[in-house]
Image (spheres, rainbow, N blue to C red):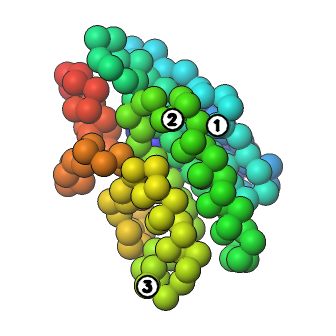
Amino acid sequence: LISIIVTKHFDKDRFCMTGYDTYRCFSNIKYGGCIVYVKSSLLANVITNVTGTTDIADFIFIKIPRPGKNKPVCIGTYYRHNKHTKSDIINYINLIDCHLSDKNIKNSNCIITGDMNIDLCNVSTNNDILMYFNTFLCHRYESHINSPTGYKFLPMILPFGQQRLLTISFLIFLIKMLNLEY
């Protein structure tokens, strides 16, 4: 279960969920930040070298071990600050490329979500957006939500071979991917 927080005044008790651990990344700007809730029994940890905040984005990656399975599950979420400059999007793409090259991410089944603040509908007319998509493709990821969604879904980017139906909630998706009961 992943959520994007858009306030600097984070009330820890307000966003508490019984039975879930909370992992936060505070923004260095007025609005932004990320929060990830993971069921406590899953024993998740933050991947610190790919978690943080910059002037471009806030991001957090969580690793969930899967005893008896080959690879752990990694959940990453981004909040790209709502800037609209060419250098901003290029720096954001470079940041994502660097994260996807990290050995913790490469050696896991990783799901990436977030508020990218990029109009993905313009892929055929905007080279920066094409570069954004190609960055994920180069790392063998595929985007599953490519149009504005409002508050219904966060964009999901999954490794090839991990595609699932998006008609179920994200939490149930993760539970099924981890082969847990719900």
What SS does tag 3 mark? loop
Please tell me how crowded label 2 is: few (under 14), some (14-19), or many (20+) other residues with Cα within 10 Å.
Answer: many
What SS does tag 1 mark? helix
| Residue 6 appears anywhere in the view | no
Q: Is residue 92 above or below residue 85?
A: above
Label 3 vs label 1: CA separation?
A: 30 Å
Mark in the foreground, 2 or 1: 2
Is 36 situated left or right of 174 in this image? right
Q: Is residue 156 above or below residue 111?
A: below
Please tell me how crowded label 1 is: few (under 14), some (14-19), or many (20+) other residues with Cα within 10 Å.
Answer: many
Which badge, 3 or 2, comes first in the chain's sequence? 2
Outermost residue toward the bottom in this view: 125
Mark 2 vs 1: CB contact within 8 A: yes
State the image coordinates of residue 13 (x, y, percent, origin top left). 60, 30
Q: Is residue 113 above or below residue 134?
A: above
Mark 3 vs 2: CB contact within 8 A: no
Label 3 vs label 2: CA separation?
A: 29 Å
The residue where tag 1 is placed is: 50
Amino acid on which disc 3 is placed:
Ser
| Residue 96 appears anywhere in the view | yes
Amino acid on which disc 1 is placed:
Val
Say which residue appears at 68% left-offset and 32% top-offset. Answer: 49
Which badge, 3 or 1, comes first in the chain's sequence? 1
Label 2 vs label 1: CA separation?
A: 9 Å
Which badge, 2 or 1, comes first in the chain's sequence? 1
The residue where tag 2 is placed is: 105
